[in-house]
Amino acid sequence: MAILVTGGAGYIGSHTTVELLNSGYEVVVLDNFSNSKNISLRRMEEITGKNIKYCEVDLLNPKGIEDIFKENKIEAVIHFAGLKAVGESVSMPLHYYLHNIVSTINLCETMGKYGVKNLVFSSSATVYGIPEYVPIPEDVPLKATNPYGRTKLIIEEMLKDLYISDPEWKIALLRYFNPIGAHSSGLIGEDPNGVPNNLMPYITQVAIGKLQELHVFGNDYNTIDGTGVRDYIHVVDLAKGHLAALKKLGNIHGVEAYNLGTGNGYSVLEVIEAFKRVSGVQIPYKIVDRRPGDVAVCYADVTKANKELDWKAEKGIEEMCRDSWKWQRENPNGYMEDVKATSQHGI
């Protein structure tokens, strides 16, 4: 029996796939490679010493999804696939509603048809909107402030309705905060298309010389230094949280939400300083206007995940920065370096 990982070639999906394989799970990866590269699959195989079965399928293609369930014995699904840029979602809301919500409907319909009713869903702290207080527990009212967050919130509500209609479903909603870092091998990491939307790859691309300076979106928030405060979590800790949730599914009755974060907040300028300490590289930056949909402070209350999942983030901000820098330094153009090398050798 296998675990189907949708979006398994992407940033969080690839690290989770590695942890699954290292823990003895059989894995099938589904990805359309719209925001990932299939080279990451070979890198995962190099890390784990195991072959990875993958299917290039878009979740907007129901037949493609069904073929996977016909050809494989799937026992549970970890669902990462989707679009994830807050700013882009503000300018392209319909694109996000289509690719995040309709794709999840297609996936769940096929899962139900084949009797696969164990699901770990990749949600987001954006479902909390502008928090009234921090740290944020799971039971506060949900009120997303941008289309990306609303797609996650709609899917969460949809999955709750799915359980009400069929109590055989067991669903974990993982609301994670701000994943950064990379695998300690330097073989897999975050490889965004174009100018990064997330802070850490933006910092590392400035450090490596690909970008001239970092844009800091706003310095007039009510925070320690005026810049936005977030709960940054190492992507490997986050990946291990998915394994903990997968193990918990057997004891879940219905739908349970869990925050995955460290429970600590760092400002943008504090992250820049931490990166400078571990890398020795100066990061020139420029203060620009706030981004639409951003909030001032957001960090997690992780009590529930610590207790019920027996999981806790272990890596600190400097290790997150160090691993991010190693990934960028050894892969200055991300996976594209490997793509070019492969092409030159005629493989």
Image (cartoon, rainbow, N blue to C red):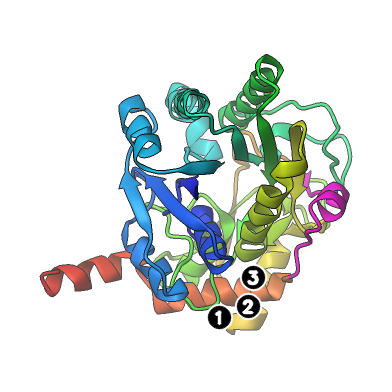
Give the residue at x 60% y 77%.
Answer: 322
Q: Which element is circle 1 on?
A: loop
Mark 3–mark 2 CB contact (< 8 Å)? no
Count of labels in the image: 3
| Sequence-first disc among 3 and 1 | 1
Give the residue at x 54% y 59%.
Answer: 25
Query: Which residues fall within the magenta stretch?
Result: 296-314
Q: Vertically, is 340 above or below 267?
A: below
Query: Label 1 neighbourhood size at 10 Å, few (<14), some (14-19), many (20+)?
Result: some
Task: Place residue 344 in its image quadrant.
Answer: bottom left
Q: CA distance from mark 3 to mark 1?
A: 16 Å
Mark 1–mark 2 CB contact (< 8 Å)? yes
Q: Vertically, is 156 above or below 50?
A: above
| 140 to the left or right of 173 | right
Where residue 290 appears, as percent x and y from the top left, is: 63, 42
Task: Please name the residue that numbered disc 1 is placed on.
Answer: 281
| Sequence-first disc among 1 and 2 | 2
Where residue 128 appears, as percent x and y from the top left, is: 75, 34
Q: Residue furthest left?
A: 346
Q: Depth check: 113 or 173 in front?
A: 113
Q: Depth check: 193 or 310 in front?
A: 310
Task: Please name the residue that numbered disc 3 is placed on.
Answer: 320
Task: Place residue 312 in its image quadrant.
Answer: bottom right
Q: Is residue 235 magenta?
A: no
Q: Amino acid at mark 1?
A: Val
Where residue 257 appears, as percent x and y from the top left, is: 75, 38
Q: Residue furthest top?
A: 165
Task: Please name the residue that numbered disc 2 is placed on.
Answer: 276
Question: Does the rendering let one see residue 268?
Answer: no
Q: Which element is circle 3 on?
A: helix
Give the residue at x 68% y 43%.
Answer: 174
